[in-house]
Structures are given as C-alpha cells and as structure tokens.
Image (cartoon, grey):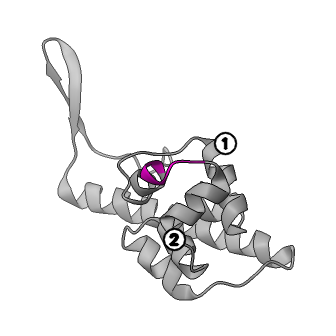
Amino acid sequence: MSSSNPVRHAIVARGGRPAYVRVPLREWRRLIRRLEQAEDRSDVEAYDRAKARGGEAYPIEIFERSLDGESRIKLFREYRRVTQAELAKRAGLSALYVSQLETKRRSGSQATLRKIASALRVDIDLLAPR
C-alpha cells in the first residue's frame, strides 16, 4: 500500500496485546482486489519467464481452476495423466504426503516442491507462485 492511500483501520487488543485489525468493508474489498491483482501479475510473470525460455504452453483451465482454489500440484499431475502413487514414486515421497499437499492439508518445503516440479516436468514457479 502506498502512503498516499493509507488503509483506515483500528487495532483491537485483547489482554493488553493487539489481537486483530478492524477494517471497513470497502477497504477490505480494495485490499483483496489488490492482492488478487498481485497474484495475477505473478502468474503472468511466471508465464512470461516460461515463454522466454521456450517453455511448454499449458491449458488455461489449469490456471482458472487454480484461481478457484484447486491445488496446482493436482492440476499439473492430472494434466500429465499421472496418479498420486506414480507422482509420489517419481518424487521420492509417500502417496499420503502427495494427497495431503493436493488437498492443502500440508504445504511442501521448497525442496519438496522442486522434487514434484521435476517429476511433473514443470517449472517450480508454476507450482508455488510468489
């Protein structure tokens, strides 16, 4: 946020410590819109990097479904027509862990995401956008 357009807010304390921030609904919607725009820019930048490298093009549905909250690991796994068990084997992980990553019950480390990206033959930025 720029200092020329500050967010109106109130810090609410509990037990003498800041507990949460109260923000007017209009401000909240503006913040969410800006966050979504930043995520969109990140996706475009990842695409531009892949395209500049002569990278593979992927169906737009992968990214649309990702914006709806689906796991990119799952989406790229399905695109590659790989089962969870096969992805787990290729990446040296357990099938349970892959399932937990896909359902977002767990988040993978950078090392784990690198293994999965390699197994799926995709850039890690496509699995974990900044």
User: Residue 102: image x %, image y %?
Assistant: 43, 60
Q: Please, what is the dominant secondary structure of the magenta stretch? A: helix
Number of dots carrying numbers: 2
- Residue bearing mark 2: 83
- Which of these two is toward me, 120 or 69? 120
Magenta region: 93-97
- Residue bearing mark 1: 111
Check the image and report above or below for 62 versus 37: below
Q: Please give the name of the residue rendered at 78% of the width and 69% of the height, measured from the top-left corner.
A: 49
Asked if the magenta segment contains residue 84, the reply would be no
Mark 1: secondary structure: helix
Residue 122 falls in which quadrant of the image?
Answer: bottom right
Q: Please give the name of the residue rendered at 40% of the width and 69% of the height, measured from the top-left corner.
A: 70
Check the image and report above or below for 62 versus 15: below
> Quarter of the image containing the C terminus?
bottom right
- Which of these two is toward me, 48 or 19? 48
Which amino acid, mark 1?
Ala
